[in-house]
Image (tube, coloured by chain):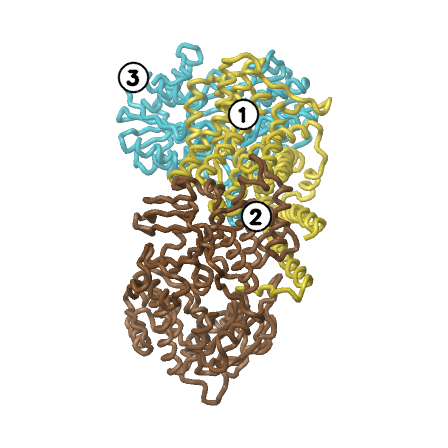
Chain colours: A cyan, B yellow, C brown
Amino acid sequence: MRRFSKIAALAAAGTLVLAGCGGGSGGSGGSGGSGGDSGDSQSAEDVCQSQADGDGPSIGVAYDVGGRGDRSFNDSAYEGLKRAVEELGATCIEAVAGQDENDNVRAERLRTLAEGDYDLVIAVGFLYSPAAAEVAPEYAETKFAVIDGFSQFLVEEPLDNLADLTFAEEQGSYLVGMAAALKTESDHIGYVGGVTSPLIKKFEAGYEAGARSVTPDIQIDVAYLTEDQDDSETAFANPPGGRNAAAPMYEDGADVVYHAAGSSGSGVFEAAAAAGDNMWAIGVDSDQYLTAPEDQQPHILTSMLKRIDTAVFEVTESVADDSFESGGVVYDISVDGVGYSTSGGFVDDIEDQLEEAKQQIADGEIEVPTEPQG
Amino acid sequence: MSVVRRGALALASPVLALLLAGLIITVVLAVIGDDIAGFWSVMSSVPEPRNAVAMLNQASVLYLSGVAAAIGFRMNLFNIGVEGQYRLAAFAAGAVAGAAWLPGYLNSLLAVVVAMAVGAAWAGLAGALRAYRGVSEVISTIMLNSIAGFLISYLIVKVGRTTGNATGTDPMPEGSRIGTIAIFPDSPTELYGLSLLAIVVGVLFWLVLNRTRFGFELRATGASDSAAVASGVDSRRMIVTTMLLSGAVAGLVGLPVIFSSAYNYGSSFQAGLGFAGIAVALLGRNHPVGIAFAALLFAYLSQQANLLNILAGISPDIVAVAQGVVVMSVVIVYEVVRRYRVRAEQTQVASTLSAESRAAAPTEGAAS
Amino acid sequence: MSSQVDTTPAAAAGTPAIELRGIGKRFPGVIANHDVDMTIRAGSIHAVVGENGAGKSTLMKILYGVQPPDDGTIAVNGETVTLSTTGDAIARGIGMVFQHFMLADNLSVLENVVLGAERLHGIGDAARERIQEISRQYGFDLDPDELVETLGVGERQRVEILKVLYRGASIIILDEPTAVLVPQEVDALFTNLRLLKAEGHTLIFISHKLDEVRAIADEITVVRRGTTVASVRPDEVTSRQLAELMVGSELPSPSTEESTVTDRVLLSVRDLEVLDAAGRPELSGISLDIHAGEVLGIAGVEGNGQTELVEAIIGMRRLSRGSVRLGDEDVTSWSTKRRRESGIGYIPEDRHRHGLLLDSPLWENRILGHQTRPPSVRGGWLSLRGARRDSTRIVEQYDVRTPGIDTTARALSGGNQQKFIVGREMSGDPRLLIASHPTRGVDVGAQAQIWRHIKDARREGLAVLLVSADLDELIGLSDTISVLLRGRLVGRFDPRAVTPQDLGSAMTGADDPTDEEAPA
């Protein structure tokens, strides 16, 4: 019994400590970033502390697990926050989620942020939705915005201080799907998703539709890193898994692979670099060409941009000029909420076609599906 | 050993352990360069009523998880599978409650029974593998945890619905939801009705463990497997029964949240409670009352993580570190105190006996 | 360990090989040794005798550097030394052969010997030569390349002695070397020991078997209750006198009174077979009957199936063939619990592993093995009051020396633990008592009491199965003695007519026991 309890203690303590070091949570997936490396200088500076004297709106930001410095989802939100502070004179306070939380703890975080008569509380990640739906009615003077949220479906009556900021990921994916189909020489491309959640399926759906719009019978290999929606570790913090999923695609003849797998995506880039010249990978969320190591840059065709920074900035602006829009706010291609990057210049030759499709989507001439057609 | 002395020793262990843990955490904070004064001022602040309620809710859930783990631990079965058992059971309960085959509270009752049955079955698998095929329950429960995750993901697509970016089971009808209990009039959060399950389970656990034959056999098996077998305990049946019980209690872990707050099983359902339960059980020395204190402590630490983060600017991960440190300190201090107590008792037996009579037949020297 | 100690006799100047003065050692709760004085002449065989638990083993561990003494001085070859590790002792030329062999079965003799002493002669031919040389010199007859698992007990013991010699020991401590040997092997060992003595080695021989001690020793030191009480020469004392020195009071003897054997068969075992995990028989063709009022003794060298036999009867091992009947009922398919409920009391050979919950209080230990029966359990519920009251009764009736029933079993001495077990197993009206090595490791006082309780049980009409390694105990208590050899019952003896020599022959299969009664 005694020896047993000692072993058990070690195991338990190990579990807890490891949990503390864990990666992103709850399938706030499609969050980009090239993973791996320790946080950059951003995490050291803090715009909320250095510029606390603005006269703009006061904002509380609740980050997802990992917080600032994750080169991904949270950092993207921070970029928008920084812009809001600089351009709108906003003041802010921040909080970050821990591993394996429940709705209670999340709600409590939003409450604590709302307490000091804050004008706006921004919750980063769809897992905040139930918490925001619970807390918003308690603080009528404060606006709540949930990135990727679905809180509007959880309240009985629409609240005029609660907004879900979602993105038309499928539209951006459509464009990079086109780019893949235009660039491939083997008519064979691939897709690596983090987890089979509705959110990540949207990426696949748009990518597939975009590719087939160019080459209807194009071969698309699809792989997901896990099907367990609670296992964000395997899905979004798993570069070896990304590499293992992408490498066979390249071996089987695919020459472009798109990923929507958070920092697992860096494994996809490694696989592309290892596969040799003219093998491409497509990044996600932010312009991953800018953060990738030099040897991988020549392989990053483009990135699907998901402008969380824009959403954060614009929602702050709407609070500042009293035009806050409650309910579901979709950042689609028409407002540049999603798009594609051109760093590296690899898509310059097809930019005309992409721009044309972009316009057609914006005009509603092309309707992009949100579920894979198979 | 006198009652007073026994009591003093029993009390000394947790106090010493907490002091040691506090010291280690302070050192960790100092090394990292975090705000030590801020940490302690947040940690020692009196929680708001709504925090206190949230703490109780969290503690009740952790308590159930801790008891589920402790049932196995008491007989040296390392059921790591509480994690998978409670998630699968919570999913099953959410699916059954959402399907609403029965009206009102009958539906809730059915869901609770299903949850316990699913938890028990999932643990029972590992128990049966251990008893009849000699498969280590550590390995099998870890694997079953993983399988549970996949199974839920697979099934939730079949029976669940997608809302925005989240998937979940259908919400249960109003009539099957279980109300909350207002403890403080002005608190927006209230105690989950099914949190009271923790008290019921705790009392039953104590009663079964200390007052029944089954409990005795379970403890005997944990203290000495070989002695229990020689005394007539059927160790295979004990393993299976214990795992079934452990799993059934694990099945309850997710229910307070599902019936009083979320009303379905979905993406924002809390994972990791099973692993936390292992730590809680260890911290509570697998004792019904000890686990209660451990659950409260863990819940308190988790609650304070938000404030720590917002008010003192310390990463909430330090709380996970603190929880780990507390568990380690407890194990170390209890072992030290236990050794001291064994020595003290042997000395006392020897001195009592030699004082009793020098004339009687020789007392024994040490054999070796 | 860089230099080899000179093995020539140090006796020249008459300096004692070892001189102990005022050695004391305390453990929590017990004084293991106090005021030990002992002088061991160089080049002699010096026996240290004493009952189990008298403190011999602790004393030898002090001498071998396993535990430092709390008081007193040790002088080796006239030089006062501090032995704080076994390394110190080995460097002084002291070696020890433990009672339980420390050999790796899957290694050869050579590998076992050089293990940990590679620096002396390497691990190759030089080492092999040295081993062969020692083996020849002392008549060990060991092949360096043979696997240890193929060796018999006597040969393994010689490997242990060889290990010690290889490391250059001139003073060798042998801890109960004859405990595991049958009489014929004992003779062989003594021949080896005499050769060693002739070569100038000093031998310290620990035992409590007085005849052997008188046969081999030049001098005898008697240890009782932690201290040395006498130093005698073997030709000055009789075994009986020695025993009285050891015990310090009149010697209890296990002699049996009037026969109480009835013709009512209580335990009947037929054609029993037990297989090990690999499917080899550990017991085969075992048939025996025990009548009410009869003690059946099972003799045998340990490891010949005694443990398996007991566990088969109590239901802890599955039979591959055969039947067990208790009274009128066939219990072959019954669980251990049901067998115990129907009246089997069980004193296990290893009380720490099978008889007690060491960290539980005595009253909880009262429940163990009786968890389905009053007074400690009613229905599915424990009766704490019943268990406590009955524990108090056992403590009083069976003279268990303890401050109270809330004391944990671990805090008691071996004898008191065993008395509590005997008391527990005698409660609940058993019909059959299985006593496996009931007096192993208990003090003399407890031994006499346990013997009395077994005799009482017999008088009350219980059937008793007594397994023991102590032939005197078997002869003194049993109505019939059967011998187990390699999983079979090979002989049946009348204890009134049999000698330990006869039993020894049967136990080793050395000769046919047909001049006694035919096997059952």
Please name the amino acid that badge 2 sits on.
Asn
Residue indicated by mark 1: A127
Q: Chain of mark 1?
A: A
Q: Nearer the viewer, mark 1 or mark 2?
A: 2
Whether discs 3 and 1 lie on one chain: the answer is yes
Q: Chain of mark 3?
A: A
Q: Whole-percent x and y of residue C48?
A: 50, 74
Residue indicated by mark 3: A216
Contact? badges 3 and 1 (CB < 8 Å):
no
Contact? badges 3 and 2 (CB < 8 Å):
no
Q: Whole-percent x and y of residue A128?
A: 56, 24
Q: Secondary structure at mark 2?
A: helix
Report, in whole angstroms, how far the alpha carbon at label 3 lies from the one at label 1: 36 Å
Quadrant the C terminus of chain A occupies: top left
Answer above or below: position of B135 versus C415: above
Residue A345 falls in which quadrant of the image? top left
On screen, residue B94 versus residue A371, left or right, reads right
The answer to which of marks 3 and 1 sits earlier in the sequence is 1
Report, in whole angstroms, how far the alpha carbon at label 1 lies from the one at label 2: 53 Å
Q: Whole-percent x and y of residue C362?
A: 60, 50
Q: What number is the disc on residue C365?
A: 2
Whether discs 1 and 2 lie on one chain: the answer is no
Q: Secondary structure at mark 1?
A: helix
Q: Whole-percent x and y of residue B276?
A: 55, 36
Q: Nearer the viewer, mark 3 or mark 2?
A: 2
Within 10 Å of disc 1 (Cα), the crowding (few <14, some 14-19, many 20+) is: many
Q: Chain of mark 2?
A: C
